[in-house]
Amino acid sequence: MMLPLSILYFISGFTALLYQVVWQRMLGLFSGSDVRSVTIVIASYLLGLGIGSLISGIWSDRLTSRQAIQVYGLCNLAIAIFAIFSRFLFYDVLFLQLKSFAQSTSLILLVVFFSLLIPTILMGFSLPLISKAVNRHAKGSARLIGLFYGINTLGSGLGAFLSGWYIIGTIGYEKTLYFGAILSVLVGLLALILSLRVKNEQPIPFSGFKFSPFVSPQVLEWCFYVFLSGFAAISLEIIWFRLLDTILQSISYTYAHLLAFILIGNAIGSLVGASLIRQIRNPRSFFFILISSVITYSVLIIWLVSLYWQAHPTNLEVDIGYIDPQNLDAALFFKYLVLPFIILVPPNFLLGFYFPLVQKAVQTDDQQIGQRVGLIQVANILGNTTGSLLTGLWFLDVMGTAGSLRLLLFLGLGFFVLSFFKTKAIKYISIVVLMLIIVGFPNNTRLWAMLHGIPEQQYFIASEDATGVAGVTEANGKGTLLASGQAQAGFPYMSVHAILGSIPALLHPQPSRIMIIGLGSGGTAHTAGVNPLTQQIKVIELLGAELKVLNTYSKTSIGRPLRFLFSDPRYEFIVGDGRQELALADQQFDIIEADAIYPWRSRAGMLYSSEFFQEVRSHLAPGGIFVEWNVGLGTAQTFQSVFPYVTQLGMNDQLSVLVGSDHQVDFNPDVLLAKLQNPDVINFLNNAGVNIAKIRHDVQTAKVESYSHAQNGKPLPVNTDLFPRSEYYLNQPLLD
């Protein structure tokens, strides 16, 4: 029974992470793609698991082994049914029908929590049920519980890896859910069949629910320790993701890739810990040393990596996160395999020890095996949830990454003190060492300068909040905006952005209202105000730290044009998800521009899908135009599938501009050149610090291609919300 049950539990771990990756993305359409919404989805997921663990922990002790396996099988069948209908619930209902509810953090948390409640509770049932199925006595149960926990986590790691790198990119989100549902049905049916082979023994006499574990000093104490360790673990995970997401350029493969390293490290640790648990005499002291070592190692390795990255910087303007399968080099291998391994695997291997370790400490009652498994799991999940919300929404916002790491070091210091309470010399040495690390660790600006490869003597300013990290550096009389590790744009404004902003505003006969999705360096948004007839410009930026760092940079000589941008009363700057803000807008616009990120970046598909383009089209005023940079990977063909008339402007070797509308857009170079002679236009562009002569030259030499869907339409693969092929281009190569 042990082998087939472990296989089934491995597969259910696989499906759990497959579902999580897909549901997180689908719910992100409703809640937004910012860090706030991601944190809310993760916290809601964890809370549901905790509730399920608590219920199952109390209930499972009343079941026989056969009954526990049967309930486990039924739970998987129910999860499969939910997975099949989740596309309708999360996309058709929440996103398409209830998007107006996504206007406050508390409301989003409430909606997301209840939408995930059923499947996460059912998933939370699993471990207490499995623990009860394979253990009839508390003595020696820690080993088996740890083994099954490790097997399940190993399945989760494989699920994250394969879903991220292959399954989603090959068949899309909806079919991935159906694939997961098939696996869940298989697990459920096989579990029911397997239960028939289990002896139908009588349960251990049960004298009603014992609530003593809730008040027992020993269990309560361990729940508190586990809560703190769960808090530290998820806080570190958020920081790991922020750091590595910056280094890896935040492409769609990154999240699942890093999650796989974390889970596999954790799984191996749990399996090794379970096999060694009998040799551990003092679980309490070992646990304290374990958690403090995890925190200390994590901080030190981040420090060392930042020093290495400063000494071996990459060209940020060239390194744009694109993986060329025809040009795989050692640097890519180092970034995606070596670096995640040394940062993530050792601490998560140590964290994997915690579950069998704690179970050895608390499993002392045959009647409460499932209960105590559930309680410990609940304590860990509550710690995870609290850490996720506090670190993701507050600590990073207030203290930044460096400050958050210092806070965790103080927690590690506390665990060190507790672990060596009998040995004063070691205790004092550990306190001194940790205090030196706390004091010597670089401040937030210096840390991010190092991680961007900026020399100490080079100008660098940074801003960090819950939405992410942004910075500006100067070298050779040029400024460069850095967002999430990538060079987004330069100062003075790059000609690409000057053209992208100014030409549409001059092309439209009367652009009264304009919406810009994506601020970047401000170049596109700033030059979009070139037309004196423009009265309102809404600028939506996902990364709030960008606004802060640009306001600071505006006080410098090179950043001086930003002063004109931020002082122009026509502009309204909004920190938020561009697509969400557009959907909730109660007005139409003459021009909408998506100065978006590269289509292969994580969640970029939300701004390159046919559904987004349809949303844009519905918010265009009569005669309105939509403008987007044609960066390839299906952008043009998706664009053409929505807009009846498309004009492609080849403005220079670097820029291809797509202009979409419900009518034919007349690109007349003579008319544009005449507008560029207007004194108000010239004065405006001079204040923006752009090269007017370059704009005129690009207008004169522009290559114009017109496309009519009625005449040239043909079925081609396009980017959709539920299948963002551009993000998963390694699996779905697209040709424009």
Image (tube, rainbow, N blue to C red):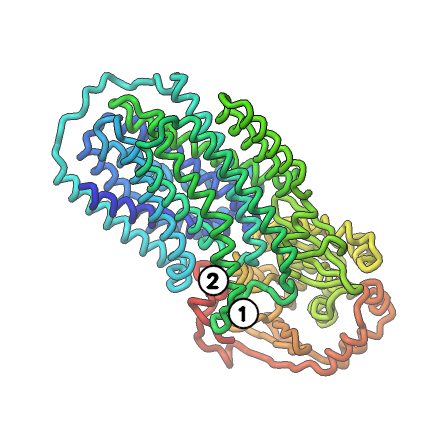
Neighbours of disc 1 within 10 Å: few (<14), some (14-19), many (20+): many
Residue 1 vertical placement versus 675 (above, below): above
Query: Can residue 606 be spotted in the picture?
Result: no
Disc marking residue 724: 2
Q: Secondary structure at mark 1?
A: helix
Q: Nearer the viewer, residue 194 or 345?
A: 345
Instruction: Please indicate whether residue 682 sits to the left or right of residue 174 in the image.
Output: right
Quadrant of the image occupied by residue 556: bottom right
Q: Nearer the viewer, residue 524 or 231?
A: 231
Q: Measuring 53% from the left and 41% from the top, which residue is drawn there?
A: 297
Q: Nearer the viewer, residue 31 or 655?
A: 655
Q: Position of residue 570 (x, y in %)?
A: 77, 55
Q: Looking at numbered disc 1 in the image, what kind of residue is underneath it?
A: Thr
Neighbours of disc 2 within 10 Å: few (<14), some (14-19), many (20+): many
Is tag 1's residue or tag 2's residue first in the polypeptide sequence? Answer: 1
Q: Position of residue 120 (x, y in %)?
A: 37, 40
Q: Which residue is mark 1?
A: 635
Residue 226 vertical placement versus 34 (above, below): above
Q: Secondary structure at mark 2?
A: loop
Instruction: Please indicate whether residue 330 sits to the left or right of residue 452 in the image.
Output: left
Q: Looking at numbered disc 2 in the image, what kind of residue is underneath it?
A: Pro
